[in-house]
Image (cartoon, grey):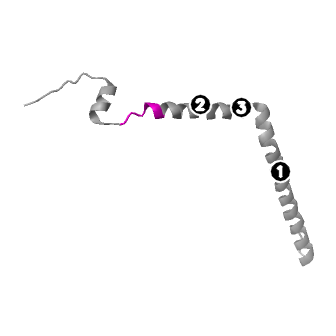
């Protein structure tokens, strides 16, 4: 034996019947906040802002890497000379 029920109702009516909370106001508030943050972050994506943000860090990184290489190179030469070994 098969029993089939067809219930014709809107999603709002089904939500209320099942006792589920109405999250529409929360979603609207959340979406406004997401839109506000997205618009503020889009301004940081302008090429001029990107260059200002990334360039100083990358230059500093290159300088640090160059200094590290120079220290290693000068340290290798000093140890080789101090021990009398040839390179």
Q: Residue at x 62, y 32 (%)?
A: 36
Which secondary structure, mark 1? helix
Q: Earlier in the sequence, mark 3 or mark 1?
A: 3
Tell me where residue 73 appears, x and y as whole percent.
Answer: 87, 63
Q: Which mark is residue 60?
A: 1
Query: Magenta stretch: residue 24 in it?
Result: yes
Tell me where residue 63 appears, x and y as whole percent.
Answer: 85, 52
Q: Residue at x 90, y 65 (%)?
A: 74
Which secondary structure, mark 2? helix
What residue occupies the far top of the structure in this picture? Answer: 8
Q: Is residue 50 left or right of residue 13?
A: right
Alpha carbon separation for disc pair 2 and 1: 34 Å
Q: Which residues make up the magenta segment?
A: 21-26
Which secondary structure, mark 3? helix
The 10 Å Cα crowd at callout 3, few under 14, some 14 to 19, many 20 or more, is: few
Q: Earlier in the sequence, mark 2 or mark 1?
A: 2
Alpha carbon separation for disc pair 2 and 3: 13 Å
Tell which of 16 and 65 is nearer to you.
16
Which quadrant of the view contains residue 42?
Answer: top right
């Amino acid at each position: 034996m098969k029993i089939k029920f067809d219930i014709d109702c809107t999603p709002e009516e089904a939500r209320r019947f099942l006792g589920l909370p109405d999250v529409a106001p929360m979603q609207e508030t959340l979406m406004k906040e997401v839109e506000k943050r997205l618009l503020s972050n889009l301004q940081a994506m302008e090429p001029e802002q990107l260059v200002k943000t990334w360039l100083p860090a990358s230059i500093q990184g290159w300088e640090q890497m160059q200094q590290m290489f120079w220290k290693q190179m000068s340290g290798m030469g000093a140890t080789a000379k101090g021990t009398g070994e040839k390179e």
